[in-house]
Image (cartoon, rainbow, N blue to C red):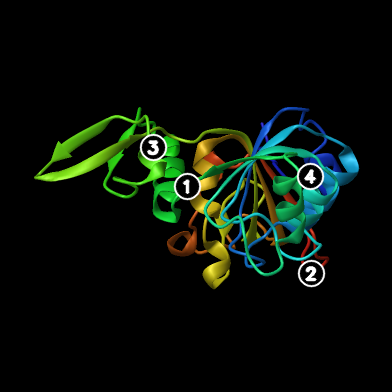
Amino acid sequence: MVIDKSMSSPEAAVADIFDGASVMIGGFGAAGMPDRLIEALIAQGARDLTVINNNAGNGDAGLAALLREKRVRKIICSFPRQSDSHHFDALYRAGEIELELVPQGNLAARIHAAGAGLGAIFTPTGYGTLLAEGKEIREIDGRNHVLEYPIHADFALIKAQSGDRWGNLVYRKTARNFGPIMAMAAACTIAQVNEIVPLGALDPETVVTPGIFVQRVVMTMASAAAA
């Protein structure tokens, strides 16, 4: 049986994302943001989504556009407010979106814990703050730690530089950010790539996300033919 995870279009790749789904979206601001997949998700129409992302959108494109269309019920992120996060700000002030604020290191650790199959983690970050209220506290090596649970998702939308039809991915510099751990933590990972190369073209030493963690790959630039 030939394994081919390549999809014909971003629209086909996100077609089965359902109302109420939890969706991880890669990116650190615009770096590594899967803009074409987000555009396809907006056109697809899924709503009441729980989105896990580093921030809450920038300007009017990408995640910000998804928020503008009021498709997101809850967002789990580290930096919800920036100078150009006006769509989130308006929604939050109007009580139209729920926010779970997570320190950036905890966010990454909780996503990684989901991908690693851990039941929970203890972290010192957040101890003694409002973020630790109601959570179990344990002293470890003389320092208080907060119990945090993994963050799983139904889908992960990520962006990589190159991929093959098996789903192996190579990233471009800091555009890598949350992509690798989100790919591990979602039931279905969809990767937007600039090129799909023939099998064997990717140096195994440069593959960051193995294909076992990726279910779909879609090329959004016509710079290479599919394997």
Q: Nearer the viewer, residue 39 or 164?
A: 39
Q: Which residue is mark 4?
A: 7
Q: Which residue is mark 2?
A: 223
How far apart marks 4 and 2 lie (CA) works out to 16 Å
Q: Residue at x 82, y 42 (%)?
A: 70
> What amino acid does circle 3 point to?
Ala
Q: Residue at x 84, y 40 (%)?
A: 12
Q: Does the CB distance between marks 4 and 1 fall below 8 Å?
A: no
- Which circle's residue, 3 or 1, is located before the other in the chain? 1
Q: Which residue is mark 1?
A: 102
Q: Which residue is mark 3?
A: 116
Q: Does the CB distance between marks 3 and 2 fall below 8 Å?
A: no
Q: In the shown orientation, is residue 128 left or right of residue 83?
A: left
- Mark 3 is surrounded, within 10 Å at the Cα level, by few (under 14), some (14 to 19) or many (20 or more) other residues, namely few
Q: Nearer the viewer, residue 213 or 175?
A: 175
Q: Residue at x 39, y 46 (%)?
A: 109
Q: Tell which residue pokes out farthest to the left in this image.
A: 142
How far apart marks 2 and 1 lie (CA) works out to 38 Å
How far apart marks 3 and 2 lie (CA) works out to 34 Å
Q: In the shown orientation, is residue 2 left or right of residue 185?
A: right
Q: In the shown orientation, is residue 220 left or right of residue 83?
A: right
- Which circle's residue, 2 or 1, is located before the other in the chain? 1
| Residue 69 picture location, percent across and down | 85, 46
Q: Nearer the viewer, residue 163 or 47?
A: 47
- Mark 2 is surrounded, within 10 Å at the Cα level, by few (under 14), some (14 to 19) or many (20 or more) other residues, namely few
How far apart marks 3 and 1 lie (CA) works out to 19 Å
> Which disc is residue 15 wearing?
none
> What amino acid does circle 1 point to?
Val
Quarter of the image holding residue 80? bottom right
